[in-house]
Amino acid sequence: MKNTLTFLGTGTSQGVPVISCSCDVCNSKEKLDKRFRSSVLINLAKKNILIDSGPDLRLQLLREKVDKIDSVLFTHEHRDHVAGIDDLRSLYYSNKNEIPLYMTNQVHDALKRDYSYLFSDLSYFGKPKFSVNIIENKEFRLFGNKIQPIQVMHYKLPVFGYKISDLVYITDANYISEIEQEKIKGIKTLIINCLQIEQHISHFNLKECLDLISFVKPQKAYLTHISHNLGLHNVIQAKLPKNVFLAYDGLKINF
């Protein structure tokens, strides 16, 4: 049975369209130019694994008719990647199963601070049950499958990408060390953040993404975490190499 990945959202922190912006992308009527904040849902061995719980999570899960989440992997603590964590309550209420969360100590400290009501020792009616699993840059197993963190840098902030089977998902990165690049060389499917055309202080731009893809040599690559500054979906897609694709909200791929 093939594993599947669904792009719940492919936009950057402001989403697309951006509030109060009147650029061609934000005014576009094309469905492919509408982007929720970045997150993916992986179905692995009949288990639903969520990577990040952004602020659009409720609408994303309703759109995809998701009725259970078996675990959540967090890449880092920025709000556009964690702010929908409260919406996991509904899934806990309906399934009554503790939801395992995987994160670094740094992410855990941020969540305890910013969402103390979810992570306090105090029990109360309506509080979901999470089991927190602290991970490091070492391979671990999830439902019998190997998960390999990929350490990247988001300017000065460490962020985890994840290698699952022959797929690598990396978001919010502008630097990957040679050691970490070796983990992903020759991968079948690479998903990588691509913010815009111009260089950016904390995200790969289009040229940097294509250079990385040329080095890694995946069979297929998908660009995500896209801002309105990258350009219209169909215009940019027409300029990309044959094995490189702009991801879009709702896109499903097998791996």
Image (cartoon, grey):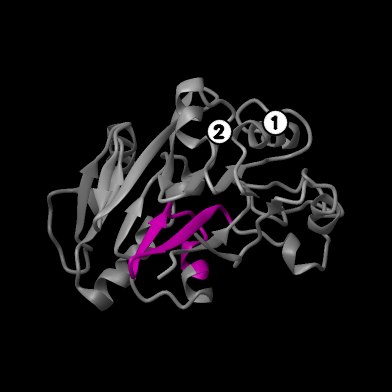
The label nearer to you, 2 versus 1, is 1
Indicate yes or no whether the magenta region holds residue 94: no
Packing grade of label 2 (10 A; few <14, some 14-19, many >=20) is: many
Give the residue number, with chain letter if any, for mark 2.
Answer: 173
Q: Kindly identify the residue that appears in the image at 73 percent across and 28 percent down.
A: 199
Residue 130: quadrant of the picture: bottom left
Q: Report the side of 247 relative to 83 (left or right).
A: right
Q: Kindly identify the residue that appears in the image at 44 percent across and 67 percent down.
A: 2
Q: Is residue 130 above or below residue 172?
A: below
Q: CA distance from mark 2 to mark 1?
A: 14 Å
Q: Report the side of 6 relative to 97 (left or right).
A: right
Packing grade of label 1 (10 A; few <14, some 14-19, many >=20) is: few
Dot 2 lies on which element? Answer: loop
Dot 1 lies on which element? Answer: helix
Label located before the other in sequence (2 or 1): 2
The circle on residue 211 is 1
**Cβ–Cβ under 8 Å for marks 2 and 1:** no
Q: Kindly identify the residue that appears in the image at 40 percent across and 49 percent down.
A: 164
- Residue 200 lies, in percent from the top left, at 69, 29
Residues in magenta, as a range: 37-60
Q: Dividing the image into 4 quarters, which one contains the N terminus?
A: bottom left
Q: Nearer the viewer, residue 212 or 22?
A: 212
| Circle count | 2
- Residue 64 lies, in percent from the top left, at 50, 74
